[in-house]
């Protein structure tokens, strides 16, 4: 069947006929007209998908000629029509669309005719899927392809925003037809961020970039990396982050990956402390080379204090450290060690210091423990700081830094022993020194045994530990 003779009925009418054919009926049914869109809604989508579908136009139509069940299973077409209208008329969807305003394509309706990019090159023009596979395609499939090619960009958006419509378009892209790819490319170029952040539309974005050649990938990459704020909003959203991670994977080995890394570098701090953004950065470390990630390493060193003292950023920074490689990792760890005293007092920063201590690097551990000298008593009285002190005490050969601070004042040691946080620190000190430094252990015991008031308040826990002989294998009480 020739594509020139294929009927040009709207895809929506084709979808409506699914329910009729599934029930074995060829009776014509009139499609309801959509509610008119308020003039304030932007962007103003064309209503071509609804054109020529009034009750008078559909009355007596030969619905058997419309392709049925080409890609989709049975579903309620009436519900789909309503869903499409709601997607355009509801306040939430319109608001999200307005976020990505000014995204109109400079190529107009036909992206392929833009001479500067020459997307319709000789390779694409020579053969397309429909022509070369005409005999292997069913008439319904030929009609489906030509129906999509006849839709306006706004109609493609409507389909992408619907679960079944999105699956329909993804199936078309699987055929690798150059005309379909370029049709979808034009839509994605006009509204990339809207599709990337949509629960159904993001599937269309991912499928398209997997179908594009390098030149087309470059076009999409340049588009979405040209506006930092829009890229940032996409990267911290659930579906947008998935799209960006997939794009990164597709761009491995391509020079266009530098565009993505550059915008991630510029928005590094904001991305690392928001939503799904950190997963995008970590994906780069897991996927790309050290040379490609160099800008991200530099950004981490520039913003490590801001990240470490943020409730989300401290987790992101720890994950970033785990996936770093090379010289820059050593430099970042050294910076954190130099600022250990400040970070250990912070409710979030202390977790970063603990994480570095857990790496069991002798040089870093010694540097942190020495940087905290003179501050162990103060930190032991803090909820989060006390955890850092305990980590230092448990680090091999480092207990003496903290214990020497404790033994500088008898009253100071006694105050710690009766404190709600400090008593745990002293218990840890007794256990560690009993196995590692017996002379320090005896000095601690002598000072503590002189205070008979330990059996009251929080000191009672320490009193019971000493009375039991400080069992090193027992849990701290």
Image (cartoon, helix red, strand yellow):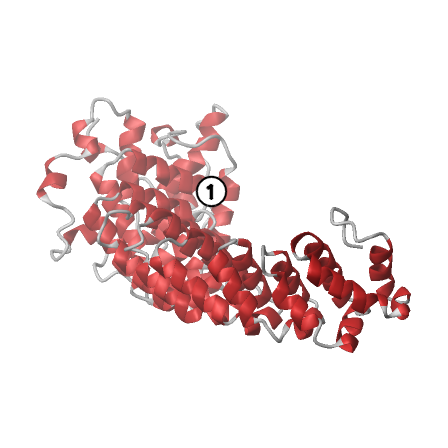
On the picture, is 268 further left or further right than 137? Answer: right
Q: Position of residue 450 (x, y in %)?
A: 85, 69
Q: Position of residue 285 (x, y in %)?
A: 38, 52
Who's the residue at 49% across and 43% down the image?
Answer: 80
Which of 338 and 230 lies nearest the eye of the viewer?
338
Image quadrant occupied by the C terminus: bottom right
Q: Quadrant of residue 431?
A: bottom right
Who's the residue at 46% across and 51% down the image?
Answer: 239
Label 1 residue SS: helix
Who's the residue at 27% across and 44% down the image?
Answer: 150
On the picture, is 198 further left or further right than 461? Answer: left
Q: Is residue 458 visible?
A: no
Q: Position of residue 212 (x, y in %)?
A: 25, 44
Q: Is residue 434 visible?
A: yes
Residue 31 position (above or below residue 194)? above
On the picture, is 96 further left or further right than 439? Answer: left
Which of 237 and 47 lies nearest the eye of the viewer?
237
User: Which residue is label 1 attached to?
Assistant: 163
Which of 136 and 283 lies nearest the eye of the viewer?
283
Q: Residues within 10 Å of mark 1 (few under 14, many from 20)?
A: some
Which of 4 and 154 lies nearest the eye of the viewer?
154
Image quadrant occupied by the N terminus: top left
């Amino acid at each position: 069947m020739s594509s020139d003779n294929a009927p040009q009925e709207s895809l929506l009418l084709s979808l409506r006929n699914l329910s009729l054919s599934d029930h074995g009926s060829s009776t014509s049914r009139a499609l309801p007209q959509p509610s008119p869109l308020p003039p304030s809604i932007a962007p103003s989508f064309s209503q071509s998908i609804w054109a020529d579908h009034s009750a008078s136009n559909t009355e007596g139509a030969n619905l058997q000629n419309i392709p049925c069940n080409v890609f989709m299973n049975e579903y309620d077409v009436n519900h789909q029509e309503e869903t499409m209208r709601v997607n355009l008329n509801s306040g939430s969807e319109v608001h999200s669309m307005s976020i990505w305003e000014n995204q109109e394509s400079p190529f107009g309706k036909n992206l392929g005719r833009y001479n500067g990019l020459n997307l319709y090159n000789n390779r694409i023009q020579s053969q397309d899927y429909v022509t070369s596979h005409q005999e292997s395609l069913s008439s319904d499939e030929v009609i489906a392809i030509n129906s999509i090619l006849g839709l306006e960009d706004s109609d493609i958006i409507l389909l992408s925003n619907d679960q079944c419509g999105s699956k329909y378009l993804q199936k078309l892209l699987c055929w690798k037809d150059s005309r379909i790819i370029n049709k979808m490319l034009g839509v994605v170029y006009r509204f990339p961020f809207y599709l990337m952040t949509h629960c159904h539309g993001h599937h269309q974005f991912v499928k398209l970039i997997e179908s594009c050649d390098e030149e087309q990938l470059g076009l999409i990459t340049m588009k979405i990396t040209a506006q930092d704020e829009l890229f940032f909003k996409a990267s911290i959203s659930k579906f947008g982050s998935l799209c960006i991670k997939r794009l990164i994977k597709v761009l491995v080995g391509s020079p266009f990956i530098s565009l993505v890394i550059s915008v991630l570098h510029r928005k590094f701090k904001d991305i690392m402390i928001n939503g799904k953004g950190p997963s995008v950065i970590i994906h780069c470390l897991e996927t790309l080379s050290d040379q490609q990630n160099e800008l991200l390493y530099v950004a981490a060193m520039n913003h490590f204090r801001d990240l470490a003292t943020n409730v989300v950023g401290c987790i992101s920074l720890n994950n970033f450290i785990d996936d770093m490689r090379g010289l820059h990792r050593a430099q970042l760890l050294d910076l954190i060690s130099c600022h250990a005293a400040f970070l250990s007092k912070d409710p979030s920063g202390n977790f970063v210091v603990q994480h570095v201590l857990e790496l069991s690097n002798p040089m870093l551990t010694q540097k942190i423990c020495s940087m905290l000298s003179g501050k162990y008593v103060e930190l032991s009285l803090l909820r989060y700081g006390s955890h850092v002190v305990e980590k230092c005490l448990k680090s091999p050969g480092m207990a003496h830094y903290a214990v020497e601070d404790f033994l500088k004042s008898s009253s100071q040691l006694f105050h710690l022993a009766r404190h709600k946080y400090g008593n745990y620190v002293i218990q840890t000190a007794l256990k560690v020194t009993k196995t590692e430094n017996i002379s320090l252990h005896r000095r601690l015991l002598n000072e503590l045994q002189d205070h008979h008031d330990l059996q009251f308040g929080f000191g009672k826990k320490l009193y019971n530990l000493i009375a039991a002989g400080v069992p090193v294998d027992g849990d701290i009480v």
